[in-house]
């Protein structure tokens, strides 16, 4: 076996919150996991798009950020020592003669496993970018499609483009730290929470924030650093907004990528599953989290946790066909407490 070849019980495609919690549920049953994610770290969209944005609907956790949730999940699964393959994409899946699977990534990593779990959220996600000449020269330095650290924008002149929740949320969240925030949208109407819109308008009326009804037309600057953002308004014509940073929030384009070629039944780029095991149309391949669909589906992290728990019970029967599955509680089982390292 080469250094890029591995053998395990379960491969999980996607290291977001649902994929991470699946490691915990599978680990309680003694199943080893490898996780593959195209991002450079765990957390998925939760850590990539809103690492510092509050989340309020995790049971028994009144509030945590996307990064805090990721950190707690990583701590929870530490005892099970999962293996991560970051910045890799699951590219090819082949059924072996013995009934197991061989998954190959775009980096040449080969993993043989008994069960495949797709926890890829909406698939690979890429931001919708404005069509501005030379924009790529500023990406990653002064043009960003997500906010990872609010402090990075302290004292800066920030232009935020868009009319959805992300644009309004970050305009409000960055307002206390930025030197000046300018929100740019092509119309005086928004697809965002009314309370956020009302708050933004209040700040604009007080002169604490700027709002421009205009289209982005260009970027100015040198060596990766913006100095201004050019806009065009129907009433005011062309002008330039002084800026140190541009945050275009035009939404995301979701793509299943190579997963679409795995031979699964698909419905509008989602994977139909049953509600007993969350198994796909192909035996021993499961889908949990936002990537799946079934009657009554709710796209909540909470729902994905539930799906991961039931999936794990079914995965055990594939991975340990000769063993009896005993249902146990972590509160009373010395065996489970030993696995968790708390006994």
Image (tube, grey):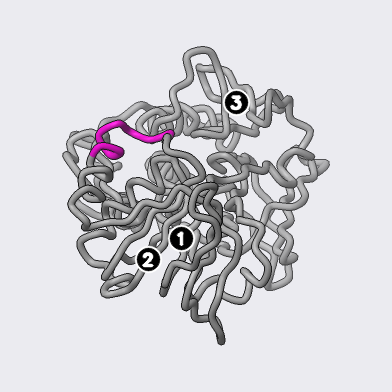
Within the image, what quadrant is residue 293 found in?
Answer: top right
Q: Main secondary structure of the magenta part?
A: helix
* Residue identifier under label 1: 247
Q: Residue 307: where, in percent of width, then height?
A: 45, 28
Q: Secondary structure at mark 1?
A: strand
Residue at point 56%, 43% (across, down)? 120
Which numbered marker is on residue 47?
none
* Residue identifier under label 2: 158
Q: In this rendering, is residue 150 above or below 325?
A: below
Mark-to-mark CA distance, 1 and 3: 39 Å
* Nearer-N-terminus badge (2/1): 2
Q: Between residue 336 and residue 295, name the one nearer to us.
A: 295
Q: Residue 14: where, in percent of width, then height?
A: 54, 48
Within the image, what quadrant is residue 94 found in?
Answer: top right
* Nearer-N-terminus badge (3/2): 2
Q: Secondary structure at mark 2?
A: strand
Q: In this rendering, is residue 146 above or below 339?
A: below
Mark-to-mark CA distance, 3 and 2: 46 Å
Judge whether residue 138 is colored magenta: no
Q: Are marks 2 and 1 in contact (CB under 8 Å)?
A: yes
Label 3: how many residues lie within 10 Å, few (<14), some (14-19) or many (20+)? many
Q: Is residue 309 left or right of residue 252?
A: left
Q: Between residue 343 and residue 151, name the one nearer to us.
A: 151
Q: Residue 121: where, in percent of width, then height?
A: 53, 40
Write down the region rendered in magenta.
191-198
Res 33 seen here = no
Residue at point 79%, 33% (across, down)? 263
Q: Between residue 270 and residue 111, name the one nearer to us.
A: 270
Most extreme residue toward the right is 97
Mark-to-mark CA distance, 2 and 1: 7 Å
* Residue identifier under label 3: 279
């Amino acid at each position: 076996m080469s250094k890029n070849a591995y053998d395990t019980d379960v491969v999980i495609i996607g290291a977001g919150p649902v994929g991470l919690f699946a490691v915990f549920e599978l680990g309680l049953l003694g199943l080893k996991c490898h996780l593959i994610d195209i991002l450079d770290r765990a957390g998925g969209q939760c850590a990539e798009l809103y690492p510092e944005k509050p989340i309020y609907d995790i049971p028994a956790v009144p509030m945590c950020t996307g990064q805090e949730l990721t950190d707690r999940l990583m701590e929870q699964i530490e005892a099970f020592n999962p293996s991560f393959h970051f910045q890799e994409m699951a590219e090819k899946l082949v059924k072996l003669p013995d009934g197991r699977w061989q998954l190959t990534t775009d980096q040449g990593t080969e993993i043989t496993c008994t069960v495949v779990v797709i926890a890829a959220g909406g698939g690979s996600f890429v931001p919708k970018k404005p069509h501005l000449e030379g924009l790529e020269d500023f990406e990653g330095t002064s043009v960003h499609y997500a906010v990872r650290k609010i402090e990075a924008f302290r004292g800066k002149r920030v232009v935020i483009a868009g009319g959805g929740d992300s644009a309004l949320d970050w305009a409000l969240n960055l307002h206390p730290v930025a030197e000046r925030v300018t929100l740019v949208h092509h119309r005086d109407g928004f697809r965002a929470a009314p309370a956020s819109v009302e708050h933004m308008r209040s700040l604009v009326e007080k002169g604490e924030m700027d709002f421009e009804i205009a289209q982005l037309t260009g970027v100015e600057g040198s060596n990766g650093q913006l100095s201004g953002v050019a806009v065009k308004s129907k009433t005011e014509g062309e002008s330039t907004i002084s800026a140190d940073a541009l945050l275009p929030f035009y939404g995301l384009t979701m793509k299943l990528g190579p997963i679409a070629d795995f031979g699964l039944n698909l419905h509008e780029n989602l994977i139909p599953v049953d509600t007993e095991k969350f198994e796909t149309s192909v035996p021993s391949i499961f889908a949990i989290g936002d990537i799946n669909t079934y009657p009554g589906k709710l796209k909540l992290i909470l729902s994905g946790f539930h799906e991961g728990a039931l999936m794990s019970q079914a995965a055990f029967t594939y991975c340990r066909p000769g063993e009896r599955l005993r249902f146990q509680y972590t509160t009373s089982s010395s065996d489970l407490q030993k696995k968790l390292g708390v006994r």
